Image (cartoon, rainbow, N blue to C red):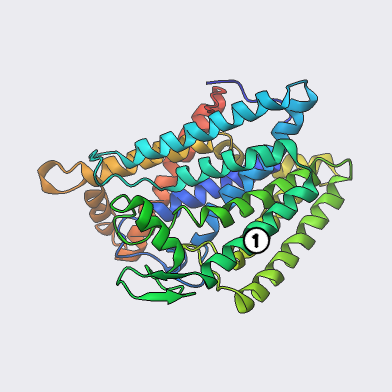
Amino acid sequence: MTHAPAQRLLSLDAFRGFTIAAMLLVNNPGSWSHVYAPLLHAPWHGWTFTDWVFPFFVFISGVAMTLSLTRRAQAGADKPQLLRSTLRRGAVIVLIGLLLNAVPQFDWDTLRWPGVLQRLGLCTMLAAPLAIYLGWRAQAGVGVGLLLLYTGLMLCIPVPGADGVVRVGSLEKGQDLASFVDRLLMDGHLWAQAKTWDPEGLLSTLPALASQIAGLLVGHWLATPRSAMEKTAWLFVAGLAALWAAEVLAVWTMPINKSLWTPAYVASTAGWACLVFGVSHWLLDSQPDAGARSRWARRLHPLVVCGMNALFLFVASSLLAKLLAFWAPGGQSLKARAFEGLQGLGLSAINASLAFALLFVAAFWGLAQFMHQRRWFITV
């Protein structure tokens, strides 16, 4: 536990807080049988609000990485030392993800190896040498190269699907190259609901790294001496351009698809990330009037406090969610009892499910506020 680092970018904390609050909301309905459509992932191709959340975290990690490493380099840290510390942080994040997957019933034979934190950690480790040793132009080149490589592999290499039929360029569940690689290397350790593929698999980490590189590039832009208003304006321009590119890529290459993390998905979510972050940056860092910035800082304070302990909130919420779902005194889980209690107040099933999720978010905002008041900031 450490004190908050100096010179934090308030708008980035608010954006991170928005993202963790969204993740808590979509991950914790009262019942998965009763959820409003925008709070579920798209069944396959396409996207919903929920499909924003994970790539926003990857994007934010890239922005923070550039700003942090630049500041530490200016303070005199040498590059090998920066690389070692960043690789160590990524490895710790991967380990935390594996430990979360092992709760509540550890079984090595069926333990899921991939996961959200595992992908975040891998992207952090893979992006570290790019962020430390390459300039923004080279980073952009690597990002584009990763998307071209992934597209070529997915569309041109024949592989047997889960049904044993060999296909070229298939993008259906369990029939694509990414799922074949996952079965080949991690059979028995994939997402339990799919078994033959994983939404956080190995090959799709390549385009996920491109999402992190998008964040690196935005970090470089924020580190320039240009005015805050100009930075915000170009965030909006970049976001709109990326959304246009996503539509082109969806037609020419592969559709927007979160599980496959297609190039169109990278461009779309990076575009939306630039727009949402641009709004945060405009409100909190670009207002010419100090009084206006102060008012918006008060209004967005709940997001800021969540953003300053986002990783801790994710881990703690995951553990609590598992406790509520698996602890069943009397044969009924605590979560089911709470859901029925909300229905008993006269709410419809779908609104009771939403109310449970909102109360879950509120509880963790209270925890974040408690920690912020005591200046407890947990980092890895």
* Residue sitting at x 35%, y 57%: 183
294 versus 7 height, above or below: below
Answer yes or no: is residue 47 visible: no
> Observer-nearest residue: 344 or 327?
327
Which residue is rendered at x = 63% and y = 25% of the image? 4
Q: Residue at x 58, y 48 (%)?
A: 58
Where is residue 150 shown, x and y percent of the image? 57, 62
Name which quarter of the figure residue 126 lies in.
Answer: top right
- Kindly give the residue lying farthest to the right in the view shown: 226
Using a 10 Å C-alpha cutoff, classify the residue at mark 1 as few (fewer than 14 neighbours), some (14 to 19) or many (20 or more).
Answer: many
Tell me which amino acid carries mark 1. Trp
Residue that extends furthest to the bottom in the rendered view of this protein: 251
Is residue 29 in view? yes
Q: Who is closer to the viewer here, 163 or 128?
A: 163
Q: Is residue 285 above or below residue 274?
A: above
* Left or right of 33 on screen, residue 173: right
Camera-nearest residue between 211 and 234: 211
Query: In the shown orientation, is residue 213 left or right of residue 34?
Result: right
Q: Residue at x 68, y 55 (%)?
A: 143
Q: Which residue is mark 1?
A: 272
- Determine whether 113 is above or below 352 in the image: above
Residue 30 x, y percent position in the rendering:
32, 55
In the orientation shown, which residue stands out farthest toward the left?
330
Residue 18 horizontal side relative to residue 43, left or right:
right
Q: Nearer the viewer, residue 73 or 177?
A: 177
Helix, strand or loop for disc 1: helix
Q: Say how many tags the image has.
A: 1
Q: Position of residue 346 (x, y in %)?
A: 29, 62
Image location (x, y in percent) of residue 28 = 37, 51
